[in-house]
Each structure stands twice: as C-alpha cells, then as structure tokens.
Amino acid sequence: FLPDLIGHLREAAPGTRIESAPWPHEDIAPALDSGRLDLAIGFLPAVGETRQRPLLADRYVVLLREGHPFVHRWRRLPVAQRLPALDGLDFAASRTHSDTLRILQLLRLESRLRLSAGHLLSLPAIVRRSDLGVLMPRDIARDFAAQGGLDILEPAFPLRDFTVSMHWSRRFEADAALAWLRAQVERLFSQPASQAPPHPSRRGARS
C-alpha cells in the first residue's frame, strides 16, 4: 500500500507526513480510539469495535523459486491430488501472517516448516536460493514474481481467501482530514475505487 499511497500524496497533498508501523492486533482498536493511530489496514479478523471498509479480496498462495522441481510435478497432477502432494515440500512462513501457520497446521504440514521469519520481505531472496516454498498473499507474491526468478502455485488451501480492510475509530469519523485520508485509501485500493473529496488543511497524518 505505501508506495502507491506515498506517490499519490506527493501530488494530492505535498508535505503530508505518514508514519507506518506494525501493531499488535489486540492493541489496534484502543490505539485508534486514543488517536495514536489514525487508521489501520490489513487482514485483521480479531480487531473489533471499529468502523471498517473492505478494500480488496486476496488469497494465500505458495511462492517458489523458478525451476523448482516440485512446480513441474505439481502442475501435472490431477487437481484432487495437488493438496496432498504438498507434504513433499518444505516451507517458510512469516509470523506476521499467522493464518499461514494455521493453514500448515490444518494440513498437518507443520513438521515441514523449516523457517519462520519476522517479515515477508526477507523471504523472496531466501526462496530464490533454496527449495523452500513460502505461503504469502497472492497480490504480494505477484509483485515479487514480476521481478523474476520466482513461480507461484495456488493450492486450494483451507482459509486461503481473506479480505483486507481499512479500520478507523468512530470517535474520529467526523475529523475532516482523516475522512479525506480514508477517502484517498479507498480511492486507490478498493474494488471498485471511489471518488475522494477535496483535501482539507491539516499539518500531518499518522497511519
């Protein structure tokens, strides 16, 4: 989200300052209500008591190095045999996407987990140099694969489909600058996009 958002704000609201940080899910709603956060974006099913707007639908896939022998073998299998065949693959996962760990548990593949990383950004370079497969959101995987050297598989995982939403506090719903910022996010990322109102003056915005 940040590259497109920053590129847009450079034109729409020069001088706006954005601060982005990971946040414990259980602390998001209180941080929004207190004003420490202006908005939160992500797949946050545990975050309640907020206003929210669905932005996009995504699903978890497997990212592998290009030329991985498992890719050719998996694609030749009948569809019914593809999910069970994953027990022949070693995996990496990110702790920031806990549902990927849950998926491996549901498939009884947790014993095949060879690497648990703190963030997704470190994993594509590792995948390119190993035989590990990493579970990650499809939209992110496509961006990594477009840089070359990677391939994507889309198994019919349990829990594979999810919705990324924008969350904010009811307490600040009438704040003009924050309403404008939310409209920009919705305009850029929602399916379908919506129109944004004119930008009100404010010193900065936090995310």
Image: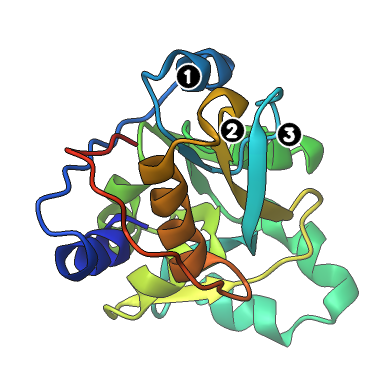
Mark found first going from the N terminus, 2 or 1? 1
Name the kind of residue labelled 1 in the image: Pro
Q: Position of residue 58 (x, y in %)?
A: 63, 62
Residue 109 visible in the picture: no
Q: CA distance from mark 3 to mark 2?
A: 11 Å
Mark 3, residue position: 105
Residue found at the far left of this picture: 15
> Which one is closest to the eye, mark 1 or mark 3?
1
90 or 17: which is nearer to us?
17
Q: Pointer 1: what residue?
A: 24
Q: Residue at x 56, y 28 (%)?
A: 169
Q: Quadrant of residue 80?
A: bottom right
Residue type pointed to by label 3? Gln
Q: Residue at x 59, y 33 (%)?
A: 98
- Numbered disc 1: secondary structure: loop
The residue carrying mark 2 is: 98
Give how far apart the Cα atoms at labels 2 and 1 are: 12 Å
Q: Which mark is in front, 2 or 1?
A: 1
